[in-house]
Structure formats: structure tokens, C-alpha cells
């Protein structure tokens, strides 16, 4: 008298192709695509420009080291090191990776 009858509900029919899985993964894919174009791609381009800049340093270029010291390249020792003149008669060896900026490009040197 006080108890009502309970009726079983049928489960919704599963859609073919697994759209539930696609809808749960889609936000993650969209986030990755946005991150790629806003963060990863520009960072790669900047790293490529920096590598090209460091590779093309030659004698006569005015450079700034990572510590902020400005000098003139007097000799390219090898692929990894340069000789930089900080003042007249003061020369130091600097690793190419320690160069933060090339200010003035020197004249091409005839070797």
C-alpha cells in the first residue's frame, strides 16, 4: 500500500565508434595543439636563430658575453672557443655558448 513498484531503466544504447572516448580525449588534444603553437614552436625558432648566430661569429665581431662584458673577437680558436679582446692587450678565451649577443658584425677576413 505504501510501497510503489520500481521499474528498471534501460541503459542508453552505445553509439558506434566510441564517441565517448573521443570526447574525453579531445580537450587534451586541443590543449596540446595550442601549447605547441604558443610555446614549443617559437622556442625552437629562437634556439635555431641563436645557434645560427653563434655559428657565424668571425674575427672582428663585437660581442657581449653572458656576464655582460663587451669585447672584440680577435681569433676563432675552434668550433667551441673564441679569443676576445676586452681592452688593449687583454685577451681572454670564451666559449661560444657564453656569448649572449653579437653587436657589430666585422668585415669578412681574407684568409
Image (tube, grey):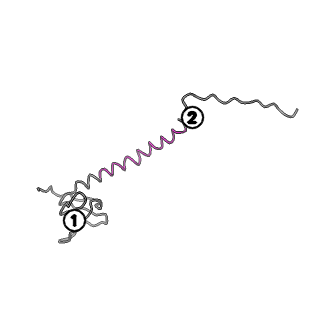
Residue sitting at x 13%, y 57%: 109
- The answer to whether 29 appears left or right of 15 in the picture is left
Q: Is residue 35 above or below residue 80?
A: above
Q: Is residue 77 above or below residue 14?
A: below
Crowding at dot 2, Cα within 10 Å, few <14 / some 14-19 / many 20+, comes out as few
Of residues 69 and 3, the one nearer the viewer is: 3
Instruction: Return the x and y of residue 90 as percentages of the image width and height.
Output: 20, 71
Element at label 1: strand
Q: Quadrant of the N terminus?
A: top right
Q: Magenta part of the protein: which range?
A: 24-49
Of residues 82 and 104, the one nearer the viewer is: 82
Q: Is residue 88 above or below residue 75?
A: below
Residue sitting at x 78%, y 31%: 6
Which residue is tagged 1?
84
Which residue is tagged 2?
20
Of residues 91 and 34, the one nearer the viewer is: 91
Amino acid at each position: 500500500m505504501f510501497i510503489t513498484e520500481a521499474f528498471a531503466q534501460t541503459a542508453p544504447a552505445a553509439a558506434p565508434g566510441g564517441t565517448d572516448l573521443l570526447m574525453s580525449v579531445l580537450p587534451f588534444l586541443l590543449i596540446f595543439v595550442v601549447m605547441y603553437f604558443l610555446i614549443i614552436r617559437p622556442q625552437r625558432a629562437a634556439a635555431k636563430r641563436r645557434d645560427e648566430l653563434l655559428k657565424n661569429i668571425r674575427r672582428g665581431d663585437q660581442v657581449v658575453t653572458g656576464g655582460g662584458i663587451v669585447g672584440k673577437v680577435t681569433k676563432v680558436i675552434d668550433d667551441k672557443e673564441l679569443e676576445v679582446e676586452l681592452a688593449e692587450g687583454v685577451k681572454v678565451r670564451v666559449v661560444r655558448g657564453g656569448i649572449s649577443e653579437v653587436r657589430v658584425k666585422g668585415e669578412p677576413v681574407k684568409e
